[in-house]
Image (cartoon, rainbow, N blue to C red):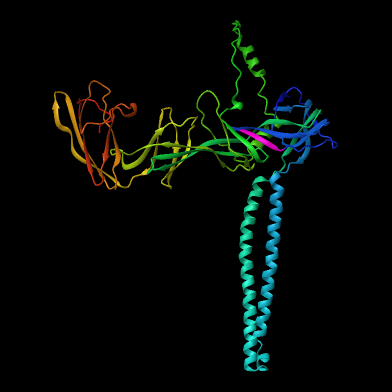
C-alpha cells in the first residue's frame, strides 16, 4: 500500500479538545528503538466519508516537532493539530488491569479468612462436646465410642479445611504482593496525556499512520554462544535487552532496533565571513561602570525547572549501546513484541547462526596457569556490536563476559577452564647482579620450564603463549633460549609474543624451556625485567 508522508511541524497549533471530538482506536503497531529514544507508530482505520480522527491517549512527553502522518490510498489529510486534553491524570493502560486483579485476590483472601474462622468455630464446638463429662456418663460404652469417633473425624476434617485454606491464602498473598509491586511501578501519578486531531477526506475505507518521537527508551546488544565440543560447532545467538518508560505500553508491536541516534543530529557547519574590527581602549572608570551594568544571568524559567525536576523523578536510565561505524544499522525482532512501560529489561532474539570452530586449550603460564578452552571461527555476516555474552559448553553454563568483536575475519571465544590439563612452572635458573659484569654492563639470567600434562582421554590441541622481553633501547641486549623453538613469532601481530602449538596425546607431558639473558648498563635502571 502506498502512503503519502505529511510532516506537520508547521501545522501544529495547541488547543483544548472539545467534548464533541470523535475519538479513534489507534493502537501502537510499530516501534523503532534508538539509543535513548524511540519512534512510535499508531495505525487508525478510517471509514469511508470520515472527516475527523482524534487520538487522545498519547503521552504528553512526545516531541510534537517529530509528528508526521502517512495517508493510504483513498484518504486525504488536511489540518493536523496537537490536542492538550486537559489536566486529568493519565491512567497507565496496565494500571486498571492490575487494580482489578489486586481486588480479586483480596476478595479471595477475605473468603478464605471466613472459611478458616468457620473451621475454627466447628473445631471449638466439637471440642466442647467432647469434653462434657455428664453427657458421656449417660451413654453406654459402644455409643460413647461411636460419638467420640464421629467428633474426632469431624474435627479432623475441619482442621484439614483450615490448613488448606491457609495454604491457599499464602499463595494468593504472594501473588497479591507481586501485583501490588507492579502496580506501584506503573501508576501514572499526575502525568498529562495529549492527543492529535487529523482532518480527513476519506473517499473509501483506508488507514492513516501517525508517528512521533519519545524519549526514555533504549536497547543494548547481548549474545549467547553455545559450544558443542564433540561436533566442533558453536551456535551464536544475537539478542538485545530493551526497556522503556515512555508512558505507554507496547503490546504486540512490530519492533525494530536501530543504532542510529536522531537526537544527536547536527547541521553541517558553514563558515561565515570573519570580519575584524578595532575597539579603542576604554578609560578605567568607564570600564568599571560597563562591568557593573552588565546584566546578571537570567534564572532558569519555571517550566524548564519543572521539566528538569520531572526528568529526575526516578532513577531510570535507558540501556546504553556502543555504536561502531559511520552509518546506522537496524535489526528487526521476529514476530510481535510486548514491552511494558515500567522500565523492566526484556530480552528479544534477533537471530541465530551456527559456525564451525577450531578448538584449542590456551594457556599463558607466566600470567595464569589455568588453561582455557578456546574456540576460533570465521566472523559471521552482519554487524556485531560490543555487548555482554553468555557462554555455554556442551549444554552447561560456564560464565559470562564482555565481548568486543574486533574487525578481524576470525573471532575467538573462551569457554571456561580445562581441568584436565595441568600446568606447572618450574624456576630452572635465576642470576642477577653477581651473574657477571662485562666492563660497565650488568647481566641478568632467568630460565623457567613450563610442564603441561594431559589427563584427557583423547588428543587435544594446546596453545602456549609467552611474552618474551623486547628491548626498546640499544643499551639493552636480550638473548632468548627457547626450547623447542616457537611455532609462531609475534602472535596476532603482537611484538615479542611467541606461541607453541602441539597436539597433546592422552597422558603425555610436554615441557618447554624458556630462558633469557639480558645485558644492560650497570648505571641506571631497566624497567620490565623478568
Residue depicted at x 72% and y 42%: 190
Is residue 381 shown left or right of residue 215?
A: left
Q: Nearer the viewer, residue 309 or 127?
A: 127
Vertical placement of residue 177 versus 318, above or below: below
Q: Nearer the viewer, residue 514 or 30?
A: 30
Quadrant that contains the C terminus: top left
Is residue 521 shown left or right of residue 77?
A: left
Q: Nearer the viewer, residue 332 or 436?
A: 332
Where does the image place residue 420, in percent across and percent down from the top left?
Answer: 30, 47
Query: Furthest residue to the right?
Result: 20
Is residue 60 shown left or right of residue 529?
A: right
Where does the image place residue 20, in percent across and percent down from the top left?
Answer: 86, 36
Residue depicted at x 61% and y 60%: 171
Prevailing secondary structure of the magenta residues: strand
Residue 288 image-quadrant placement: top right
Q: Is residue 206 visible?
A: yes
Where does the image place residue 188, in percent across and percent down from the top left?
Answer: 70, 43
Vertical placement of residue 70 versus 319, above or below: above
Vertical placement of residue 141 versus 378, above or below: below
Residue 32 image-quadrant placement: top right
Where does the image place residue 98, in percent across and percent down from the top left?
Answer: 68, 50
Residue depicted at x 43% and y 47%: 395
Vertical placement of residue 55 versus 94, above or below: above
Is residue 101 shown left or right of residue 239?
A: right
Q: Is residue 420 magenta?
A: no
The span shown in magenta is 27-32
Amino acid at each position: 500500500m502506498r502512503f503519502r508522508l505529511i510532516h506537520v511541524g508547521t501545522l501544529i497549533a495547541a488547543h483544548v479538545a472539545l467534548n464533541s471530538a470523535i475519538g479513534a482506536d489507534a493502537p501502537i503497531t510499530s516501534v523503532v528503538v534508538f539509543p535513548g529514544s524511540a519512534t512510535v507508530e499508531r495505525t487508525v482505520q478510517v471509514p469511508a466519508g470520515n472527516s475527523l480522527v482524534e487520538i487522545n491517549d498519547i503521552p504528553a512527553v512526545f516531541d510534537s516537532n517529530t509528528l508526521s502522518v502517512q495517508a493510504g490510498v483513498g484518504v486525504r489529510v488536511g489540518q493536523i493539530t496537537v490536542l492538550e486534553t486537559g489536566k486529568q491524570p493519565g491512567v497507565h493502560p496496565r494500571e486498571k488491569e492490575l487494580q482489578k486483579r489486586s481486588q480479586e485476590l483480596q476478595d479471595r483472601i477475605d473468603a478464605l479468612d471466613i472459611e478458616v474462622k468457620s473451621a475454627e468455630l466447628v473445631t471449638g464446638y466439637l471440642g466442647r462436646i467432647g469434653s462434657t463429662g455428664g453427657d458421656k456418663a449417660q451413654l453406654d460404652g459402644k455409643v460413647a465410642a461411636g460419638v467420640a469417633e464421629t467428633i474426632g473425624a469431624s474435627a479432623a476434617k475441619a482442621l484439614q479445611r483450615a490448613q488448606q485454606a491457609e495454604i491457599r491464602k499464602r499463595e494468593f498473598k504472594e501473588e497479591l504482593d507481586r501485583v501490588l509491586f507492579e502496580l506501584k511501578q506503573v501508576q501514572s501519578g499526575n502525568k498529562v496525556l495529549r492527543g492529535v486531531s487529523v482532518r480527513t477526506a476519506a473517499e473509501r475505507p483506508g488507514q492513516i499512520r501517525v508517528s512521533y518521537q519519545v524519549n526514555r527508551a533504549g536497547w543494548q546488544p547481548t549474545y549467547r554462544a553455545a559450544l558443542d565440543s564433540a561436533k566442533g560447532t558453536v551456535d551464536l545467538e544475537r539478542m538485545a535487552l530493551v526497556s522503556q518508560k515512555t508512558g505507554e505500553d507496547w503490546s504486540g508491536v512490530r519492533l525494530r532496533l536501530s543504532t542510529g541516534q536522531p537526537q544527536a543530529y547536527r547541521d553541517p557547519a558553514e563558515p561565515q565571513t570573519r570580519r575584524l574590527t578595532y575597539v579603542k581602549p576604554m578609560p578605567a572608570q568607564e570600564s568599571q561602570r560597563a562591568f557593573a551594568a552588565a546584566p546578571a544571568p537570567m534564572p532558569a524559567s519555571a517550566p524548564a525547572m519543572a521539566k528538569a525536576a520531572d526528568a529526575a523523578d526516578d532513577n531510570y536510565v535507558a540501556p546504553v549501546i556502543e555504536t561502531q561505524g559511520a552509518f546506522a544499522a537496524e535489526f528487526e525482532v521476529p514476530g510481535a513484541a510486548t514491552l511494558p512501560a515500567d522500565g523492566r529489561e526484556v530480552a528479544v532474539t534477533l537471530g541465530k547462526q551456527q559456525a564451525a570452530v577450531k578448538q584449542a586449550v590456551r594457556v599463558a603460564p607466566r600470567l595464569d596457569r589455568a588453561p582455557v578452552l578456546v574456540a576460533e571461527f570465521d566472523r559471521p555476516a552482519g554487524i556485531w556490536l560490543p555487548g555482554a555474552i553468555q557462554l555455554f559448553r556442551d549444554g552447561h553454563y560456564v560464565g559470562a563476559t564482555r565481548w568486543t568483536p574486533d574487525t578481524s575475519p576470525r573471532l575467538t571465544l573462551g569457554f571456561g577452564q580445562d581441568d584436565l590439563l595441568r600446568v606447572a612452572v618450574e624456576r630452572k635458573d635465576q642470576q642477577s647482579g653477581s651473574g657477571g659484569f662485562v666492563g660497565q654492563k650488568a647481566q641478568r639470567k632467568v630460565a623457567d620450564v613450563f610442564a603441561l600434562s594431559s589427563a584427557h582421554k583423547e588428543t587435544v590441541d594446546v596453545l602456549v603463549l609467552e611474552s618474551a622481553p623486547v628491548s626498546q633501547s640499544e643499551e639493552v641486549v636480550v638473548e632468548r633460549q627457547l626450547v623447542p623453538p616457537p611455532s609462531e613469532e609475534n602472535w596476532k601481530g603482537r611484538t615479542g609474543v611467541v606461541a607453541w602449538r602441539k597436539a597433546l596425546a592422552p597422558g603425555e607431558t610436554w615441557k618447554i624451556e624458556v630462558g633469557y639473558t639480558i645485558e644492560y648498563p650497570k648505571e641506571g635502571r631497566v624497567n620490565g625485567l623478568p
